[in-house]
Image (cartoon, grey):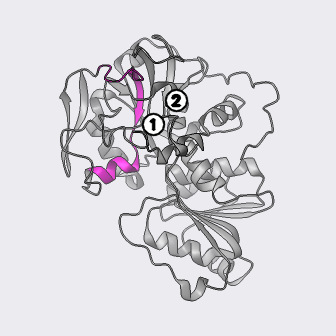
């Protein structure tokens, strides 16, 4: 098969590699119909994650069709359409039993495209397949479905839920990249009074307004007014920039919450000299994707208007071009870049209407 192979910092290529097979009885092999690129993939390419070794196939978000299952897989069979979670869950260790799949101690966690070959390929081996996939309804488009592999669960679990967003809150999201915009979309489910998005790129600020932010601006007057006035109830850092974290500490009110989503490549200053008396709660986290089934229901009901987050679509064989476009997102306008397998480009006719909302699920917010 063909796959994107990491050869060391700043070196990737679309290569021929052996097809994946069943290695453990709990594995499945999935033909990749759609995959995408994450900021973590760019960190690997910059050499910031040394645990990823040259020769690894990158990628940890995918949607596709099951083609083979191991003897102990019970919930899947060949032909099933699935969303492959970015996080693998053994479903046995204490962390997984507590739905903290990102902290799995039984061989899971974030391993796809990191410790084992990933999903930016024609086929991917999925460990613990029963617990690391979600069925894709036939009415859900590939572009929407792939957002459930990591992006939307990250926005909800690490941003909105960890930040304790509540009705009537003022919420500041620093960073209007894909995860920041997804956070603004998901936060609307909780009826905050205001959502303010901060970024340096004008095009991304305009997108933030289109997806439901009440205000969007470059760092400046609005943050200063919050810092000097009542402050934000929740400040969500989604830029991965140390200065973005400092903005959150300035904007948050006494007794408020700072939820850090952004993956920081270097240290961020914690200004305890100004925070020590504010009773601020700071949270960090690795996504668990335990919320994927619930978010899938909301998407099917039309409650998550995310279609504008996918800005570019390529064939899998243009993976290197896609990386270039995604890495230069502030210039190219790229948010989420989706790559399609040959089969889905040529023969798959996708339904675009939302799936029927499951009985009793409308209006319910799970925490």
Q: Residue 245 vs residue 51: left or right?
A: right
Would you place residue 362 above or below residue 280 in this image?
A: above
Residue at 33%, 34% (x, y): give it.
Answer: 118
Q: Position of residue 298 (x, y in %)?
A: 69, 34
The image quarter in which residue 32 lies: top left
Q: Secondary structure at mark 2?
A: helix
The image quarter in which residue 29 lies: top left
Magenta stretch containing residue 36, yes or no?
Answer: yes
Q: Position of residue 316 (x, y in %)?
A: 32, 28
Would you place residue 99 above or below residue 137 in this image?
A: below
Magenta stretch containing residue 138, yes or no?
Answer: no
Q: Position of residue 308 (x, y in %)?
A: 56, 40
Foreground of the two, 313 or 96: 96
Residue at 41%, 55% (x, y): give it.
Answer: 330
Precedes in sequence: disc 2 or disc 1: 1
- Can residue 161 be seen from the camera position used here? yes
- Can residue 207 be seen from the camera position used here? no
Residue at 32%, 50% (x, y): give it.
Answer: 42
Q: What whole-number distance in Å separates the C-alpha atoms at marks 2 and 1?
A: 7 Å
Mark 2 surroundings within 10 Å by alpha-carbon count, few (fewer than 14), some (14 through 19), many (20 or more)? many
Residue that lies at the very extreme toward the bottom in this rendered image = 273
Looking at the rendered structure, the number of numbered marks drawn on it comes to 2
Mark 1 surroundings within 10 Å by alpha-carbon count, few (fewer than 14), some (14 through 19), many (20 or more)? many
Q: Residue under circle 2?
A: 131
Question: Looking at the image, do the residues carrying marks 2 and 1 touch, with CB atoms under 8 Å apart?
Answer: yes
Q: Residue 197 vs residue 166: left or right?
A: left
Q: Position of residue 9 (x, y in %)?
A: 20, 52
Residue stretch in magenta? 21-44
> Residue 88 shows which numbered tag?
1
């Amino acid at each position: 098969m063909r796959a994107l192979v990491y050869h060391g910092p700043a070196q990737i290529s679309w290569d021929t590699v052996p097809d994946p097979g069943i290695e453990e009885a709990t594995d499945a092999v999935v033909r990749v119909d759609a995959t995408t690129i994450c900021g973590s993939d760019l960190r690997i390419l910059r050499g910031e994650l040394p645990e990823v070794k040259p020769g690894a196939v990158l990628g940890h978000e995918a949607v596709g069709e099951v083609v083979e299952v191991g003897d102990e897989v019970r919930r899947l069979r060949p032909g099933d359409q699935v969303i492959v979670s970015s996080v693998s869950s053994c479903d046995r260790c204490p962390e997984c039993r507590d739905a903290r799949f990102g902290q799995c101690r039984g061989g899971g966690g974030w391993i796809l495209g990191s410790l084992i070959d990933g999903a930016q390929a024609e086929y991917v081996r999925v460990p613990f397949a029963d617990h690391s996939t979600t069925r894709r309804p036939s009415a859900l488009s590939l572009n929407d479905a792939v957002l459930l592999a990591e992006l939307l669960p990250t926005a909800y679990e690490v941003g909105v839920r960890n930040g304790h967003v509540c009705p009537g809150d003022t919420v500041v999201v620093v960073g209007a990249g894909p995860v920041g915009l997804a956070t603004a979309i998901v936060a609307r489910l909780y009826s905050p009074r205001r959502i303010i998005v901060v970024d340096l790129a004008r095009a991304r600020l305009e997108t933030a307004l289109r997806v439901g932010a009440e205000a969007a601006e470059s760092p400046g007057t609005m943050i200063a007014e919050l810092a000097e006035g009542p402050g934000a109830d929740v400040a969500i850092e989604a830029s991965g920039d140390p200065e973005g974290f400092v903005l959150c500490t300035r904007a948050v009110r006494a007794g408020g919450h700072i939820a850090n989503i952004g993956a920081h490549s270097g240290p961020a200053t914690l200004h305890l000299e100004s925070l020590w008396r504010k009773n601020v709660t700071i949270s960090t986290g690795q996504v668990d994707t335990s919320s994927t089934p619930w978010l899938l229901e909301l998407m099917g009901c039309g409650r998550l208007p995310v279609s504008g987050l996918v800005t570019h679509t390529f064939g899998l064989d243009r993976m290197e071009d896609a990386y270039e476009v995604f890495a230069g997102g502030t210039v190219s306008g790229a948010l989420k870049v989706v790559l399609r397998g040959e089969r889905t480009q040529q023969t798959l006719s996708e339904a675009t209407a939302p799936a029927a909302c499951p009985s009793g699920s409308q209006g319910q917010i799970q925490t």
